[in-house]
Amino acid sequence: MFKINFKKVLFNSIVILVIFLSDRISKIYILKIAELESVVNIYLTPYLNIYLIWNKGIAFGLFSFNENFIYQSISLIIFIICIVIIIMIIKSDGLKKYSLISVLGGALGNFFDRVYYSAVPDFIDLHIASFHWFIFNVADMFITIGVICLILDEVFNYKKNNEIR
């Protein structure tokens, strides 16, 4: 029989909400600056700038298209992936569960922007001298950290599960 632990569901939901809200608050703040200043180009350190761009692709600007059908198709795929991640969260535990929660929280943040703005505001510009990494946002950070943790969890569990006895 399938038993639900409401305390765990509530805690996991709060973690997802905190990730989502930290992303939303950071984006609202940057968009407010853009509204007041008409451009966001802030030099913070020799390695970090805040520079607003609008991303119609997926994480880090990959698969950016101007055609509306492709944009909507990608959005639908992201929505389906979010549902699959929710199912995976329910069936997992430990590091894998919290890695998936991190990915879901970030994905929901970016999905909200895709629906609300028809693009995702990216603004964190990491660089060394003239080499600039992709401009990204807080949601992308959570997605990336979650994916890295999923990979590490898989590598360590693979070794543990396939040890010669």
Image (cartoon, grey):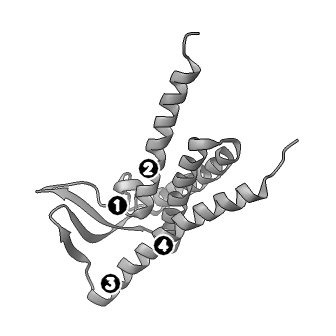
| Cα–Cα span, label 1 and label 3 | 17 Å
- Tell whether label 3 touches label 1 (CB within 8 Å): no
Residue under the image location 32 percent in, 84 percent down: 33
Residue 145, label in figure: 2
Residue 103 lies, in percent from the top left, at: 52, 52
Residue 24, label in figure: 4
Front-lying residue, 15 or 144? 15
Closer to the N terminus: mark 4 or mark 1? 4
Q: Amino acid at mark 1?
A: Phe
Residue under the image location 54 percent in, 59 percent down: 105
Residue 105, label in figure: none
- Please rate how many residues cluster around mark 4, counting C-alpha atoms within 10 Å: few if below 14, some from 14 to 19, many from 20: many
Q: Amino acid at mark 3?
A: Ile
Could you say which quadrant of the image residue 12 lies in?
A: bottom right
According to the image, label 1 marks what residue? 136
Residue 33, label in figure: 3
- Tell whether label 1 touches label 4 (CB within 8 Å): no
